[in-house]
Image (spheres, grey):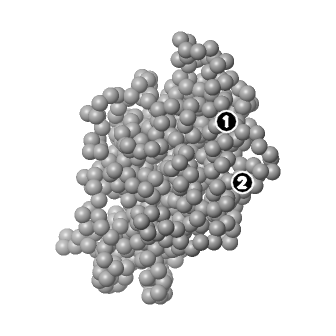
Amino acid sequence: MVMKSGAGSGSGGVVCTSFSIVLISAVFAASIAFVFLIGYFSHGLPSSFYSPSQPQFHIPIVELLSHARPAPDQSTAVLSSEFSSKFKPPVTHDYDDGPPFDLIWEMQRRAENKLEQGLARARAAILKAASATNSSIIIKNNEILSPAIYWNPSAFYQSYKEMERRFKVYVYQEGELPIVHDGPCKDIYSSEGRFIHEMEHGNNRFKTSNARAAHVYFMPFSVTWMVKYLYKPNTYNVSPLKEFVSDYVKLISTKHPFWNRTQGADHFMLSCHDWGPKASQGNAFLYNTSMRVLCNANSSEGFDPTKDVSLPEIHLYGGIVNPKLISPPPSTISRPNLAFFAGGIHGPIRPILLKHWRGKDTDLHVYEYLPKDQDYYDSMLRSKFCLCPSGYEVASPRIVEAIYAGCIPVILSDHYVLPFSDVLRWEVFSIQVDISEIPRLKEILLAVSEDEYLRLKEGLRAVRRHFLLNQPVKRFDMFHMILHSVWLRRLNLRVG
C-alpha cells in the first residue's frame, strides 16, 4: 500500500473534535549513565529506577553500533549497522533548492551537539537529586507529591522538571486520515486516541515543528484504526497492519534523515490495541530498537522495558469518565464488600477466577454477567478490593477504573509490566496475587490489616493524578507520565 506525504488538514476527520553526547570524559559519562540504567525490569517485575536500596538490574547503555544488520528488504528504510556519527545521509531529501549539503550537515551536527549537551546536564541534575534525603516535595502552592508512591521522589521530580524544560517531540506529518493523525477516543483504546490527539492538536510545550530540535520522533499512526479500516474480520490475518507500518517507516526514512541516523532508536509509536506489538513487526528495527508505547506490555511476548513503555488502558464510554468516578470518592464511603469482579470469560486467567469464586462466597462478589439490579461502578465503590484479571492480553481497563473508584486493585496477571513502574511503587497502592494463589484469594485479602488497607487507600489517592486524562492536559497527568516514560528512555540513549 502506498501512503501520500502530508497530513490531512482541517478538523473534520478528527474523532475528538472537542478537544553526540558531546565529547566528555568516559568516566563522567559512565557515572551519569549509571543511575539511569538501574531499576528497569527483569521478567516484568519492577525494581528501583532511583533507589539504591531496591534490587537493581544494570543494562548496558544503548550502543547504536551494536544493532543487528537490517534484512535485505529493509535497505530502503534503515542503514547498515556501521553507524557512525560522521555519517552523512544520502541526498535523497527535499534539499535540492536549499543550502549546500555540507552546510546542512554542519547545522545538523551542531544541533545534535546542543541536544546531547542538554541531556548530559539533565542526567547530572537527576543524579544529584537522587541522593537527596528530603521526604516530600512541595511543587507549588503547598501542593505535595506524596513520597511513598515513588522509588525516589526527589529524582522523579527533578527528572520531570528537566523534561518540562528541555524535552521536544517531533510529530511526523506524513500519512493521511483516518489511520494517521487520529485515533479512538470513545472506547476501550481511548488512551491511544487521546495521546495522538494531544500531540496533533493540543497546546502543549513538548511538540516542535523543528525536526532538528527534537529529542524524539513520534509516528502518529493508529493501530486501532488500521484494524478498523484494513483488517478483514474473522481472518486473523494481521499482514495488512504490518504492511502499513512497513510502508510508513520506508516513507519517513526516505524523506527524512532522522530514522537512518539512529536506526529508529529515538523514534516511538503508541498503541493500545491488542495487536499493537504484532503491527510493530512490520519493521524489524521498529520492533527491536524503537520505543514502543503499548497497552499490551507482555514481557513474555517481546515487550522490552528497557526501551518500551507500558501504556495504561482506559475505557471511556462516550469519550468521558463515568460521572460516578470523576471525583475521588470520600474516604468515609462505606465499602461492605470485600472484593468485586464482573467480566467475560476469556483468556487463561478469568476461567480460574470464576471457577473458584463465582457464586461461592458472599464476601467476594464475582460474576461473569453482572446482575441487572446492580451497577458496575456502584459495585466498585462498595468494594474494598477490585479484582483485575488479564483477559486475552495482559492489560485491563479495570486497573485504572479501580484507581478512580478508590478500590484497591488486585492484579491477577502473568508477565505484565505495569505502567510507569520505573518511577511508581505499585505495591504502595495495589496488591499483586500469583495466579496459583487464586484459590486462596479470600485468605490473602482478609490478611491485609486495617492499617495496611488505609495505607493502600492513601497511596491510591496520591497516585490518581497520574492516571487522569485531562482536557486540557495538566501537570503530572497521564499524558505527561507517558511522555516522561519516553523521556527516561531517551536519556538512556547516546546519539553520536
Image quarter of the C terminus: top right
Looking at the picture, does residue 391 appear above or below residue 122? below
Residue in view at x 46 percent, y 40 percent: 207
Q: Nearer the viewer, residue 1 or 108?
A: 108
Name the image quarter holding residue 23: top right
**Observer-nearest residue: 62 or 19?**
19
x and y percent of residue 121 in the render? Answer: 66, 49
Up-down relation of residue 425 to residue 18 (above or below): below
Would you call the spot at circle 1 few (<14 residues within 10 Å), some (14-19), or many (20 or more)? some
The percent coordinates of residue 106 (x first, y second) are 67, 24
Q: Are marks 2 and 1 in contact (CB under 8 Å)?
A: no
Q: Residue furthest left?
A: 373
- Residue 424 in the image, given as x and y percentages of width and height: 53, 65
Amino acid marked by disc 1: Asn
Tell whether 373 sits left or right of 219: left
Residue beneath the point at 67% across and 18% down = 102
Q: Secondary structure at mark 1?
A: helix
Report the disc number at residue 195: none
Residue 411 lies, in percent from the top left, at: 47, 69
Asked if 1 appears above or below 115 in the picture, the reply is above
Classify 10 Å Cα crowding around label 2: few (below 14), some (14-19), many (20 and above): many
Mark 2: secondary structure: helix
Please give the name of the residue rendered at 67% of the width and 36% of the height, measured from the top-left corner: 113
Q: CA distance from mark 2 to mark 1?
A: 17 Å
Q: Amino acid at mark 2?
A: Ile
Q: Say left or right for 35 vs 211.
A: right
Closer to the N terminus: mark 2 or mark 1? Answer: 2
Can residue 231 be seen by looking at this rendering? Answer: no
Residue identifier under label 2: 32
The residue wearing badge 1 is: 113
288, 269: nearer the viewer: 269
